[in-house]
Amino acid sequence: MTESQAPEPLVRIRNVSKHFGEGETRIDALREVSLEVFPGQVVALLGPSGSGKTTLLNAIGCILEPSGGRMELDGDVVYDGRWLRSDLRRLRLDKIGFIFQFHNLLPFLNATDNVAVVLNLAGLDSGEARKRAVDLLDYLEVGNRRNAFPAKLSGGEAQRVAIARALANRPRIILADEPTAALDSKRAGIVMDLLRKLAVEQEAAIIAVTHDEKIFDRFDRIFQLRDGRLDTGVT
Amino acid sequence: MNLAYRDVRHKLGRFLLTCAGLGLLLGVVLAMIGIYRGLVVDALTIARAPGIDLWVVESGTRGPFAEASRIPGDTREAVTRVGGVAAAGSITYQTVETEHQARKLRLYVIGYEPGRPGGPPRLIAGRGIVRSHHELVADRSTGLGIGDRIALGRNTFSVVGLTEHQVNSGGDPAVYITLLDAQKLQFDLAPPAYRVQLARGTGAAVRDTVNAVVARVQPNVAPDSVAESVRRWKHLAAITQEGQEAILTGSLVDRARRQIGLFTSLLLVVSAVIIALIIYTMTMEKLKQIATLKLIGAPDRTIIGMIVQQALALGFIGFGIGAALILTAKNYFPRRVVLEPDNVLVLAGIVFLVCLLSSGLGVRAALRVDPATALGG
């Protein structure tokens, strides 16, 4: 899938900057970064440590307020150069799914409830939320572990439950921070194939920060960051 | 989905252990409140036992509890004749140490005139004193039983009745004997000492004295007006029941009461700090989970609800354990522990407030957590 085939990008960033501190202590983490990610695309953010990958991911995830530029997510302007939208948590709940490096499942909830909690927060009643969570776990082939607590899940199982949680509200944008870092190469490949499949089926945009060279071939585009600037994307 | 409940259930053992620890602490606070109340109640018990309105004591004293008082034995007849007095009785108080079944007993001996005011308030076993000599009604906490015989001074007394909750301000259990026996116990000398007194030519001491005369006034008569009449006799002082209770709480046990009161207040402050620390620590342990919840879109009310519910559960379960512990153990304390429902409710209210305020610290920390904390390792 290319930009020309998808007229409306799900993530559109124009000249986004972010700096920390002022004067001599000022650090420019992002310098006028622009990028677009379209439905069904799986893109990677690459770069050495301190290049601004996580800052960019946090900005797209509405966790960090940019210092300048413009940001649109799924057609909504979330940052216009001056103001970040105020209902960010609701926006995250509805439009963005997060996949973490170490899955970050809530240890006191079993696999089903870890997924259902997102649906519950979105307003679904507990019974319906659990039913949908179980369907999602089955789809991701961890349904047999639905009653297991995170401590009892293997790394791959936990990451698939985390993916199920990220997908629970059918978000259009999925942000993944080193999604395969805690997995061996075989499981990393399985997880990436799964994400690609989901991106296509749900017409979602997946943006992943990764250092894992073994999975580079699973991405549609790779954005390289250096000193807060974006190099040309590699397709 | 109740996240607070799920979190507690996941670490139930640890949570219950924390509750038990807090329960022990709150149990100590409750015990101190009970001891504080018990001290006041104990101090007033003996003064309230006769159910009278007026205390006639030696002039210039605040007797017979706060100060020594000694008045002639015939004062009772004079007081009985004062207008407005319905009944009066002479009374003596003294502390005696004796042994019973190889056990040392410290007793507060009350001498009274059977059939007149001043006797034990309520018998829980046996009967009252009907013979002029050598019968005794004992408080249950003495450990004596009906039919037991016990030596007091040079005489042996039979226990004929039992009463309860009759102790002096020092916690010594009371026994009731006749006034005549009490006077003999107080004034009769051992034969060698008596012979020495005779040889010195002083003879026997005057023993027809009492510590106080207690009086009940007639209905519709103000005790103050009768007290005023009695005070006209320059050698006597009259104190109303209300005045006597004020002397006891304001003077006799005041320092001990304030000491325990202060200690109880300190314990409450320590408990509050510990509750705050526990709740704060519980929250700090969950910061990454809270950050994750924020990141996936949980509103602040969900996070606040989780912390506050856990704090209140901790407080109330801890309080329940503490209250159950003290209510079970209070009768094993050497001194009386009095826990009135209002004391328990006030402490429950304080615990509720402390938990609420303490959870505020945790909530503050939770609300300041950056959702980005959930990202990365």
Image (spheres, rainbow, N blue to C red):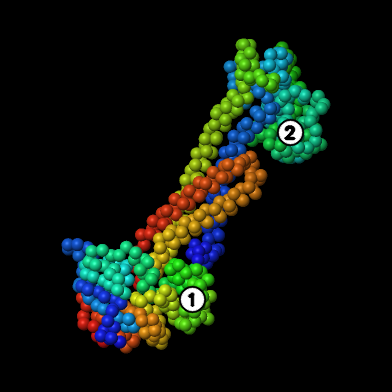
At 32% from the left edge and 78% from the top edge, which residue is drawn?
A207
Split into 4 quadrants, where in the image is the C terminus of chain B? bottom left
Which chain does the residue under circle 1 lie in? A
Nearer to me, A33 or B207? A33
Percent position of residue B106, x then y? 68, 34
> Which residue position is annotated with label 2?
B122
**Mark 2: amino acid:** Arg
**Where on the picture, by quarter, is residue B376?**
bottom left
Residue B24 against residue B306 in the figure, above or below? above
Q: Are marks 1 and 2 in contact (CB under 8 Å)?
A: no
Residue B264 against residue B85 in the figure, above or below? below
The answer to whether residue B107 is left or right of residue A195 is: right
Q: Secondary structure at mark 1?
A: helix
**Mark 1: amino acid:** Arg
Q: Nearer the viewer, mark 1 or mark 2?
A: 1
At 46% from the left edge and 59% from the top edge, which residue is drawn?
B305
**Where on the picture, by quarter, is residue B128?**
top right
> Which residue position is annotated with label 1?
A132
At 51% from the left edge and 72% from the top edge, which residue is drawn?
A128
Quick check: can you spot residue B236? no
Few, some or many residues within 10 Å of mark 1 (<14, 14–19, 20+): some
Nearer to me, B36 or B207? B36
Percent position of residue A76, x then y? 30, 71
At 30% from the left edge and 65% from the top edge, which residue is drawn?
A85
Percent position of residue A175, x then y? 34, 76
The answer to whether residue A141 is left or right of residue B106 is: left
Quick check: can you spot residue B61? yes
